[in-house]
Image (cartoon, grey):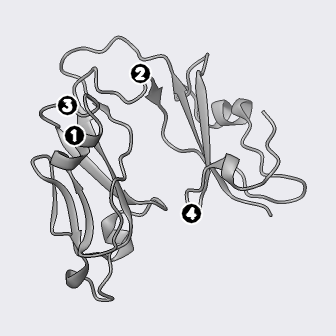
Amino acid sequence: MTHLWHIMITRKPPRIRSSEKCWTDWFDRDDPNGNGDHETLKKLRKENRGRICKRPINIEATTLSGLSPAEAGDVISVCDTNTGFICKNHDQPKKKCQDYRVRFSCHPPFCGIGACWTKWYDRDDPSGKADWEALKHLRKENPGEICDDPLYIEAVTVDTNTPALNTGDNLYL
């Protein structure tokens, strides 16, 4: 099977001034069974002690496949930095929310794994022999956006956000 890939690359965290902000890791503690999808700050903090700042600056919510709530067509009850995220099944046209994940923008040191991630890249489609998301091509096409010495790379499918290692495809680094 051939997949389209999103690639995200990380680097060592730069020196961060106190006025700058970063994003936490993604959190997905609930699914839309029952009343809906509840990614509330209270429960997320309880389950992820020390990984979310006391006063988030912003919140971002996407479906597990990467769609915004607007793109997914869901009506959202709450999406704020005080409560977190709530999607109620009974508010939806089809009576069921999508499954969401959230992350929070904070002032350092709440930057996920201690690394700064790039945006997602998708420069090639699977054709011929492979899907080529080569670092040298990504750097050439996105000058100044990717650091000299990446620490990690994450690859997921474009359509379902499935981690590359879970697809069964042969991967070459």
| Sequence-first tag of 2 and 1 | 1
Residue in view at x 24 percent, y 34 percent: 52
Instruction: Name the mark on residue 45.
Output: 1
Which amino acid is tagged 4? Thr
Q: Can residue 108 be seen in this view?
A: yes
Of helix, strand and loop, which one carries label 3? loop
The amino acid sitting under disc 3 is Cys
Whether pointer 4 and pointer 2 mark residues with C-beta atoms closer than 8 Å, the reply is no
- Circle 3 is placed at which residue position? 53
Q: In which quarter of the image is the N terminus?
A: bottom right
- Within 10 Å of disc 3 (Cα), the crowding (few <14, some 14-19, many 20+) is some
Q: How far apart are marks 1 and 3 (CA)?
A: 9 Å
The first of marks 1 and 3 along the sequence is 1
Helix, strand, or loop for circle 2? loop
Residue 160: mark = 4
Say whether marks 3 and 4 touch (CB < 8 Å).
Answer: no
Q: Which callout, 4 or 1, points at the residue further toward the start of the chain?
A: 1
Q: Name the residue under label 2.
A: 114
